[in-house]
Image (tube, rainbow, N blue to C red):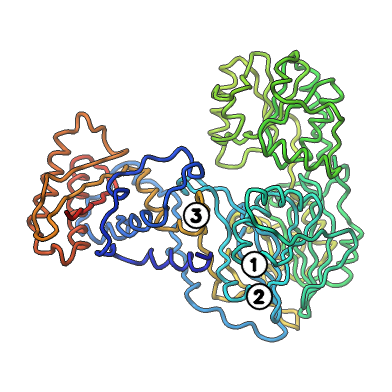
Amino acid sequence: MNLFTSWLKDQKDDQKPQTNPQIKPSAQDLVPQPKSAHPKSAPQPRSAPQHKTSSQSTHPRQHQARHGSRPPQHRSHRGGPQPKRHAFSNEPSSSTHPIPALGPNKLRVITLGGLEEVGKNSIAFEYGDDIIIVDMGLQFPDENMHGIDYAVADYGYLKGKEKNIKGIIITHGHLDHIGGIPHVMPKLGLQIPLYCTQLTAALINKRQEETKQKLNINLIKEGEILRLGNFTIDFFRVNHSIPGAVGVFIKSPAGNVVHTGDWKIDLTPVNDEVIDFVKIAEISKQGVLAAFCDSTNASQEGFQLSESAVRNPIEGIFMKSHGRIIVGTFASNLSRIQQIINLAEQYGRKVVPLGRTMTNNIIIARNLKYMKVAPHTLITIQEANKLRPEQVVIVLTGAQGEKNAALMRVAAGEHRFLQIQPDDTVLFSSSIVPGNEQSVGQLMDRIYRLGAKAVNYRMMEVHAGGHAKAEDTKLLLRLLKPKYFIPIEGNHYLLRRHAEIAEKVGYKKHNIIIPDNGSVIEFDKQGNATMLKERAPHNLVAIDGLGMGDVGETVLNDRHEMAQDGVFVVTLVVDKNKPELRAVPDVITRGFIYVRGSEQLLTEARNLAKETFVKNSKLYPQNIPELKNIIQSTLSQFLFKQTEREPMVLPMIVQV
Ligand SMILES: [Zn+2]
């Protein structure tokens, strides 16, 4: 099923009120499936049972409607602010209004993703019959996206226009810019050319090894200008936390626009060249109608620090430590990893890259000469375990307290070859992404309990991020002088704060456009911009295990509900010819109550299910869905009354 049909199917399933009465439950429906160790290791036939579950779910809205006299929500944790849900239907559903056809001589920009989150960056530019896309990222799930691996932008706008896509430009090799490629490209067309710098290409190709797809990747070289249909595209070098990052200058007959990608100014970069101010000035001379600018750190005061500036505080740790130094960082922060390697070489230590992505990234960057690593610096953990502690540095992922990352497994004593020892110093060498503070705190607790020392960036004097801050942004705007300023790449509040920075250098509100995911901005030949009231599709497209787009709002809400109060499955075995129960209804619950000690409650629930069936047996077998609804609603009310909990109640009718 392709992306768009699966997206459409998901939409339809969300609205479908009932289960198909023809479908008899399979064995899988009857037994709540144990959560497999990892969705990838045990691929399940996902769509069928999930959609079934979805359509039977007690949606908060349906729930209320069905219950009528719903018990008051007086429990403390429900009284407070509700957690963020992915209730797309609460947003203005402008995507149901068709977007008007693109008029002549107009440049249209569709901000597909990365406008309401940090991640899944992707923007499409359209003129006439030509479309180009800048970046194709993924987003890591937040705590409400139960069980999904990650999300990509919604490319529904491009449905039917695939043949118009002349090229895809990737600004740099971070996952929030390249991560969607293996999932989205097969839907758009694998033959569409991708353009990026050498390191970015290598990182994309590494991820492709897990697929059988053959991509059409083309390297962009310094000074090269691309012509893609009506677009002429030029690039300018920027600094970031990974080498090979570029900004994009897109010329169209309706005006020229700049897309910064992720960028910062680094006058003393570690393994990269300095941002190309000369090129930016030249671009400015050609006239810039609009600049789409990275908002990630733009609201922070001052200039971003150079990567070189963190050398001293990290060197302090190398000077003081007598044990091993274990550095947690992003595997994609190649500039920081380079600094650690430089210091290790200077202080006579060997470096162990722990984990596949960390090792791959270092090897790729070294082979392309984006990283300098002496021939014998890198060793394996097994080799390191034979050395004295003061001869060893280990770099690994997990400085954000991520559950499955190496550092967490090491601290939990679950790593085969690496255990924390007293005298180890663990350096958390990346800023904590908001929301991760608690898990980082718990991780540091563990490290201290094991007798080691933990140091995070806040305990050091300086921290260098990878994104432009307020003063960098002002400098760029003064240089580029775009007519329109359009903040991108960040949550809405980050875009807003970024806009305030632009106002400080004289931008008037009518020259600032703040888009959302799916916004459509048009520029006419006179150089005027408008944001249409219609929005392109902008649903959450989840990648979960092997599925893409089959987990939508309903599935996520189901998971949310199950995570809150568990699930309660009641199975009724009924004679297929007459409305007669063949056995006492059976109940299976998970995450709702402790079954032992609740026998009374379960017996009453079974009896209630039976009574309800008997009372409404005239609905059998003509209207099984309605019968299920009644049983579900009766049991939900009963369980709430008894326990003040709201498990997801799933009645199953098995005909024998
Ligand atoms: Zn980046």
Mark 3: which secondary structure?
Answer: strand
The amino acid type of the residue labelled 1 equals Gly
From the image, tell me which residue sits under label 3.
547
Where is mark 2, residue-wise? 163
Q: CA distance from mark 1 to mark 3?
A: 18 Å
Instruction: Pick the residue in front: 613 or 638.
Output: 613
Q: How many other residues sit within 10 Å of disc 2, few (<14), some (14-19) or many (≥20)?
A: some
Residue 189 circle label: 1
**Coordinates of residue 580 in the picture (x, y in percent):** 8, 55
Mark 3: which amino acid? Gly
Query: Of the residues under marks 1 and 3, which one precedes in the sequence?
Result: 1
Task: Tell me if residue 494 can be seen.
Answer: no
First of labels 3, 2 by sequence position:
2
Q: Pointer 3: residues within 10 angstroms few (<14), some, or many (20+)?
A: some
Which kind of residue does numbered mark 2 sit on?
Lys
Which quadrant is the C terminus positioned in? Answer: bottom left
